[in-house]
Image: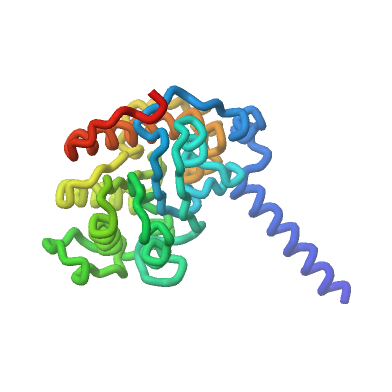
Amino acid sequence: MKLLVGILILGLVIGAVVWIRLAGPFRAGNHRRYSLGGVKRGTPNALTGRTVLCLGSSVTRGLAAGNVSFADYIARRSGCNFIKEAVSASTLAGRGRRSYIARLERHPAVNRGIDCFLCQLSTNDATFKSDPGDVSDSFDIASFDTGTTVGAMEYIIAFAKKTWDCPVVFFTGTKYDNPRYHRLVNLLLELRDKWGIEVIDLWHNREMNRVSPDDYKFYMNDGVHPTKAGYLEWWTPVIEENLCRILEEWNERKGLCEPTPGL
């Protein structure tokens, strides 16, 4: 009995240590000064009043920031509706119930309009060593090998383009020591050229990569997951600025030169 109790206590301790390491609740970058409630509404912009569907995993969810991510900060700052469809540890590759594709296909937004579709290039595909695959010559949604990361991205792009008349955008994580993810970033850039989608490439962003080692430790709980400060001060301005640009250019191409809501 004592042995069983000891094992249970050890398990709880290990679980607590793992949670603290992943969620980073005591990190300086998660101080209450960076809480979502303290963020003020900014000047109306191209995102104001719009709806963005964001498909992703723990980075989109905000795993190491109390489930607050760039999506929540942008929604607060811009006054837009940011729908987070985020499941931790999920991958692009595969067709399981938690996969990107399965969640996208059954999402209620499929049956209504959105103004922008945003998809996270998941680091889990690199972590779990999913088959990266290759960029195909096809544009036929039925032809893509969704068991690979690239095939799944091509399927998602084709599905989004067919479902919504809106910009299709992917975003990457910031640079960290993982050659597998670096390869996926470069493959995504090939898909950008093939499909004419938009990519918010944080990995190759020179200005973001100039951050000091001390600031990097403050902004990131680990190589993948930002803290609240990392989202608010480092990621959010770049993603928000790019989404505004993308929506403005889309409206110009479509002849939808309507005034920004609130102006």
The residue that appears at 60% across and 30% down in the rendered structure is 34
Residue 81 coordinates in the image, percent (x, y): 46, 42
Residue 23 is at least partly visible in this image: yes
The residue that appears at 34% across and 36% down in the rendered structure is 243
Tell me the quarter of the picture where residue 248 sits. top left
Lateral position of residue 186 relative to residue 13, left or right = left
Query: Eyeballing the image, is 170 above or below 238?
Result: below
Tell me the quarter of the picture where residue 124 sits. bottom left
Identify the residue at the far right of this view: 2
Query: Eyeballing the image, is 210 above or below 243?
Result: above
Tell me the quarter of the picture where residue 255 sits. top left
The residue that appears at 66% across and 32% down in the rendered structure is 32
The residue that appears at 41% across and 49% down in the rendered structure is 54
| In front of the other: 141 or 53 | 53
| In front of the other: 145 or 45 | 45
Identify the residue at the far left of this view: 137
Q: In which quarter of the image is the C terminus?
A: top left
Residue 240 coordinates in the image, percent (x, y): 39, 33
Lateral position of residue 161 relative to residue 228, left or right = left
Lateral position of residue 208 relative to residue 196, left or right = right
Query: Eyeballing the image, is 196 above or below 139?
Result: above
| In front of the other: 186 or 87 | 87
Q: Which colour scheme is used?
A: rainbow
Residue 150 is at least partly visible in this image: no
Query: Eyeballing the image, is 14 above or below 67?
Result: below
Lateral position of residue 112 relative to residue 145, left or right = right
Q: Quadrant of the N terminus?
A: bottom right
